Amino acid sequence: MEHEHAGSSTPLVIGEADELMRPATRRQFVQMMGAGGAILMLPGVFSACATTPVPGMGTSGGLMFDLRSDVGIFRLVHTLEQLEAAFYTAVVASPSFTTFFNGAEQELFTDLRNVELVHREFIRTTLGSQAVPDVRGTINGATLSTILSSRENILAASRLFEHLGVSGLNGAGKYIQDARNLLLAGKFVSVEARHAAALRDVAPPAGQNANTAFAGDDIVDQNGMDVKLEAGAVLDRAAATRIVQDGALSSRNITFAPTSRQGKPSADFFPTTP
Amino acid sequence: MNSSNQPILDGVDPEIMDRLVSRRDAIRKGASVSSTVAAGMAMGSVPVLLAALSKDAFAQTPSAILDVLQFAFILENLENEFYKAVLGTSAVSAQNAAFATVRAQIPESARQVFAQIQKHEQQHTDFLGNTAIPLFGGRAPSLSANDFDFTGGNGSGNGPFLQATTQIDHLLLVAQAVEDTGVRAYKGQAGRLLINGDDKADVALESALRIHSVEARHAAKIRRMRRSMSMGDRSLRFSGYVRGGGVAAAGAGNISNPPAGAVAALGLIYGGEDNTVHTVFNGVAAVNIDAATLSGLDLIGDSAAQRDAVTMAFDEPLTKDQVIAIVRGFIKDDAARGLP
């Protein structure tokens, strides 16, 4: 798990200055200073470390997330936005798109594709050198083909992705450390919630009232609150769709969870089929 | 301010620098210093110290959180009492009577939508009033249906949105505006709820975020209903997004002869929704990035299509003062209570 600090040639990656005050980290810090190591304050001085390997790439080549900083949280968001953008791009480009969906639904999916492309490019730009590499190569072609083969599959997968986005951002907000970054996450999450509601309006999950499914009792709890997941559960549910190749993305990719100084996990709320 | 799309590492926002400097002065004068700042000072590293000071300078307090919760409670009451009046379930018969004409025009499918939304607004008021506000040692403001004027007339019952009581297209426009205002209000307050590692603040923040996304679901559904009734009005999206800003973002094109007061109010409610410049703080500096100048968007289409997508991709906040300016006409003046 903690292979990021494996060698003395690896810079110490910290999310906050006071992480240096923790004995384990300070010991590492002293050792590294003795060995001529460097401190990497996320993501500030990254440009000074041109020879640093791509951050967040584990030794196995998988995506790794250190959620102790806002950058780490936005890297996870960037991963999800990449998957969504790739998925909707494939949906709209699919030969069956205009036969599966009527004009109103085509407008909906085209808007979804366009907005997810904007999200993907915006986060990529903000993260600069810390941006997550292109994940399209990890997409499982067989799974994607199965989803694209029917209207129902496309709608069900779309609903799941949007609800993962809403629940993940709702769960991650408390760990974000800067109010401006929290506002940015807020600008994304209500847009994702609009997607989620529109998709459930088009295709309610089995057993849901078509008139109220947009904010049905399965996704809004008795306090009137929306879905919410901790980050690990978001990744595991995304992996369970097998939209990415097995092993490419799961809660195991979180090398460091948020610290208790950022916040504590709360109970998740998410239906089997959103 | 840097609004180009350079990596976020370039340039320190001058405003942030000013605040940092004044904060440093405060520390020099003997103000208490958080452990984060102390660590940064001990390090003697400029980026680390800047990051630590900046974070500390934005710290929130429990009293700020209580203020947010009480503000939210008033807005949720406004929403809840509005839908109760529409549905004819208000405790005040005059409020029910005011909407009798339009109520007769509401099809059963739309009635179920209103009822579902009203249920959520009731749950929000109950949670805020019974759980969240007491958690911070406060008491919920005392409000009843009598305190509201849903025509926006500040008690006259003859405000700019009077037509919502007699015409369903106006009613849906008002419902959409109410929901979008709620989304923007919560978004604008989220930062005031942020105290990392504080269990009570975490409850307030996470609850607010989860309510915020429910309000966005409501707004999206109503936008879809309005588009279905006016298929040619493409400013109302089937995706439920807010496209563009100002009155145009309201999708009021299908409303005949809206009063000037309603147009002005919609201008406030959707003002700034077309903002494309967003701020990111990377631990060292705040950087503004203009999403309208992003590359990699060619698949969307021409520059106009890209700009539409960029405005839809970000919902924008309103400040508390901006929200008060919007809702002032819907809440009767009460010297004892004061304005929200």
Image (cartoon, coloured by chain):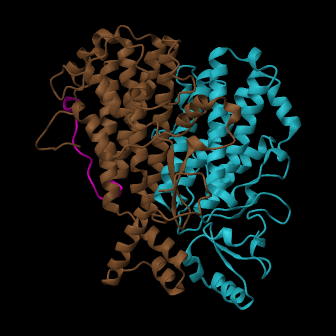
Residue at 75% of width from left, 89% of height from top?
Answer: A35
Q: Colour of chain A?
A: cyan
Which one is in front, B256 or A193? B256
> Is B100 left or right of B225, judged from the image as shown?
left
Residue situated furthest bottom in the rendering? A34
Residue situated furthest left in the rendering? B335
Residue at 24% of width from left, 30% of height from top?
Answer: B330
The answer to whether residue B93 is seen in the rendering is yes
Residue at 66% of width from left, 84% of height from top?
Answer: A29
Indicate the position of residue A171 as horizontal and vertical percent values: 56, 51
What range is drawn magenta here?
Answer: B134-147
Residue at 71% of width from left, 86% of height from top?
Answer: A32
Which one is in front, A150 or A268? A150
Q: Is residue A269 above or below residue B199?
A: above
Indicate the position of residue A141 as horizontal and vertical percent values: 87, 37
Indicate the position of residue A251 as horizontal and vertical percent values: 73, 56
Q: Which chain is brown?
A: B
Q: Is residue B97 above or below residue A174?
A: above
For the N terminus of chain A, the quadrant is bottom right
The secondary structure making up most of the magenta span is loop
Indicate the position of residue B287 as horizontal and vertical percent values: 52, 57
For the C terminus of chain A, the quadrant is top right
Q: Check if residue B138 falls in the magenta segment.
A: yes
Q: Check if residue A142 falls in the magenta segment.
A: no
Q: Quadrant of residue B252?
A: top left
